[in-house]
Image (cartoon, rainbow, N blue to C red):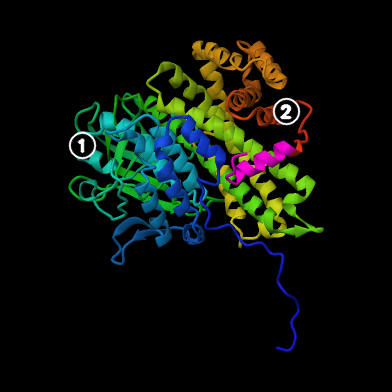
Amino acid sequence: MPWQTHTVFNQPLPLSNSNLFLSDSALREAVIREGAGWDSDLLASIGSQLGSAESLELGRLANSRPPELLSFDPRGERLDDVRFHPAWHLLMQGLCASRVHNLPWQEDSRIGDMVARSARFILHAQVEAGTLCPVTMTHAAIPLLQQMLPAPFRDWLPRLLSDRYDPRLGTGHEKRGLLIGMGMTEKQGGSDVLSNTTRATPAQARGPGEHYLITGHKWFFSAPQSDAHLILAQAPGGLSCFFLPRFLPDGSRNRVHLMRLKDKLGNRSNASSEVEFCDASGWLMGEEGDGVRQILKMGGLTRFDCALGSHGLMRRALSVALYHAHQRQVFGKTLIDQPLMRQVLGRMALQLEGQTAFLFRLARAWDQSQNPGEALWSRLFTPAAKFGICRAGIPFVAEAMEVLGGIGYCEDNELPRLYREMPVNSIWEGSGNMMCLDVLRVLNKHPGVKEQLRAEFDGVKGQNRHFDRTWRQVKQRFGKVQEAEARDLTRRLMLLGTGSQVLQHLAPPLADAWCRMMLDPRGPVQLSGQVTEDVLLRATGGAG
């Protein structure tokens, strides 16, 4: 045409074809420092593949085409299946090939497996979060199943430890790879699982590994396409844990009826369902009445994954914002060169520096959980991490949206999806109050944890006055914390846990800036030009 209304310019390209591992200096250093340097080359390969335009498009497609419930087949027979977009299956194939669902539980496991697995989890979270749900439940369930998988299903173990993803309908005996889901909560209870009404009646004998008939419901039945679920039900001896396969050993379908899929704010790619059990077959895990204890063995691992997943989403939001700010011109300068924008992005990057150091210290504690001191460390700081990091992610992604302006609020961009994903990690596996009460429980029931904290935090005493003051205040409150104060105590403990890692491992100017930013009661402070330069360089893969 002989005219045009305008020329498109100064519109930044979207972030793609980057290496998610090599572009993150803090992550690279933490992996080496905490014992998984042997995995760096593979992590670099995974980071390149996941950062590609093709992988990012799979993440978009899986969420724009949510799963569909197929209740019946064309003949009217119950089907109780879930249909996913092909993108979901490709993403799941990549997760299983990376062994995110079972790396630490292999027979040839080595020091640093949990650290390496945590890094892989964070990288995958930056591309698509819904697929992490069946992966994290399987990862948490395998240690329990290795100890007490019921006899009819013993040949499942090699398939649970496989690197294959097999979405076919069929018995676990026929498949090359298996996944495990969970079903705990009911309509009337939520986190209060002791109020569950689903009942389990012995088919014949009672006791560990025996067959029971399950009748009742679950309000949230996560990943209903899984090959089996671990559920809670009221047996004659009390609330108990049961292994509930999708298909029975004879090839028939278990009587697990999917009523509907949840219409969720985020996590759209993943199927979460409501179910009814109509004399479904389940096998008792452990003793009757021991269900809560069995579930808690898995709860710590799934809660840790919530924190890892939120951190991965935050890291992706920062990367998108930084890439945009390096391209966009405003008032004669790129956004990254505007003083106020540099402060915003610098503080965001510094926040993630601390989180990375803290999370990988926690990963090391999980990796060495056979050590009582490390087990206690993970017991205390896992709920604190879930509380602090998952809640911090929501305003963090909103801040990244502001960097992009209006386009960051539009569905053409990936930030709205990241923003919708954020609340689920704060809610799932126990919301904020539950995490804080758990921290309080650890402090009250395990006196040794206080001595462990003193040894850890006194080790960095004198390096920063803001850290020292916060630690003095927390010590004064030990032994007299009221339940209503549990949130504040949990927040402070997580900041101290992070601060101790920052003071040990970050360059002194960055460590001092982090402590002033996060622990100074007067509020956020301005970062120096050099600190801002260093932390932004590190956030894009530079040495800092």
Kindly identify which numbered label has been placed on residue 154: 1
Q: Position of residue 356 (x, y in %)?
A: 55, 35
Up/down of 25 relative to 93, above or below: above
Q: Amino acid at mark 1?
A: Arg
Dot 1 or dot 2, earlier in sequence: 1
Q: Is residue 189 visible?
A: no
Q: How many marks?
A: 2
Q: Secondary structure at mark 2?
A: helix
Q: Position of residue 348 (x, y in %)?
A: 67, 41
Task: State left or right for residue 107 relative to residue 118.
Answer: left
Q: Name the residue rendered at 42%, 34% in the picture.
A: 36
Dividing the picture into quadrants, the one containing residue 155 is top left
Quadrant housing the C terminus: top right
Q: Name the residue rendered at 61%, 38% in the picture.
A: 352
Q: Position of residue 135 (x, y in %)?
A: 40, 44
Up/down of 384 relative to 331, above or below: above
Q: Which one is nearer the viewer's eye here, 328 or 91?
A: 328
Q: Which residue is mark 2?
A: 516
The answer to whether the residues at label 1 and label 2 have Cβ atoms under 8 Å apart is no
Dividing the picture into quadrants, the one containing residue 329 is bottom right
Q: Residue furthest right?
A: 331
Q: Magenta region: which residues?
A: 530-544
Viewer-side label of 1, 2: 2
Q: Which secondary structure dominates the residues rendered in magenta?
A: helix
